Image (spheres, grey):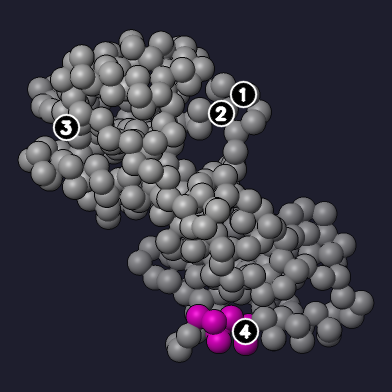
Amino acid sequence: MQRWRGLDSIPSGWGRCVLTIGVFDGVHRGHQLIIRRAVATAKELGLPSVLMTFDPHPAEVVRPGMRPAELTSLKHRAEIVEELGIDAFCVVPFNRAFASTEPTAYVHEVLIDRLHVAAVVVGEDFRFGHKGAGTVELLSQLGDQWGFAVEGVPLLAEGQLKISSTYVRACVDAGDVAAAGLALGREHRVEGVVVHGDGRGSGLGFPTANLDAAPHSAIPADGVYAAWFVLGNKRLPAAVSIGTNPTFEGKERRVEAFVLQDGGNFYGRRVALDFVERLRPMVKYDKVEEMLAEIDRDVARTRALLGPGS
């Protein structure tokens, strides 16, 4: 898969393509329907498929300080969409100038002049251009005028619930990582670098890898979780604590993973945590012995949830 940063990175002589556009944060199952439809259309037409997304999140530019928590890093987003069959991943820097582009100019300058689209596949609620004035209906009218097809894919709904990034964030924020995983079609992931902590875990028999999570990450609610600790191609079972460690009067909120299998020295390594299920809320214990007994139970439940070999 080709990866482009900015419209100027599109190769010269780029031919026609099938395009899908969106933030696609989370690349949840609703997003996957849209992306798969774009890939299928591209194959039908014998053309490459392109996914265009934005950085930073448009909300950060349109409503400064209101950037939503990030469900997937750009790197992880690219990996997921590559698996779905996308041929080119284009990240457009989102700034005030881009945000102020009128819908018609947006289509002409980006879709026609730069990407030479033959077809555009988007969600049925897709909006574009200055103040989101552009709709799928307008895009279709412009497509008729300039010679490209447009398809608005219905949003994925289960009963009365529409699968969306907002819904997934709400699940993560509540600590319901199992529900988030169902909507995503895979475990919710938090990425970061392992840093030194207080060293208290080692003395208690439960050494932890302390994750310095990437900025704006959607971190689950305080509590203890069963998760996969992902290091390169290895997925190791882990019991993960999120919170301030109230038993020891902690003040700083931390993400600490006790890896159940020996994976070596993690310090300074970039890793990920794939959250499977919340085991319990964060609790302040009167005695350290009570806490250690509870951690033993957390480890046993993690092993039971993650299966043989954990």
Badge 3 or badge 2: first in the primary sequence: 3
Of the residues tagged 2 and 4, which is closer to the observer? 2
Of the residues tagged 1 and 4, which is closer to the observer? 1
What type is the residue that disc 3 sits on?
A: Cys
Residue at 82% x, 70% y is 283
Q: CA distance from mark 3 to mark 1?
A: 32 Å
Q: Which mark is residue 63?
A: 1
Q: Which mark is residue 34?
A: none
Q: Tag 2: Cα neighbours inside 10 Å, few (<14), some, or many (≥20)? A: few
In the displayed structure image, the side of residue 162 where residue 288 appears, left or right: right
Q: Which residue is mark 4?
A: 301
Badge 3 or badge 1: first in the primary sequence: 3
Residue 80, position in %: x, y? 34, 52
Q: Can residue 58 be seen? A: yes
The reply to whether callout 2 and callout 1 are in contact (CB within 8 Å) is yes
Q: Which residue is mark 2?
A: 59
Badge 1 or badge 4: first in the primary sequence: 1
Badge 2 or badge 4: first in the primary sequence: 2
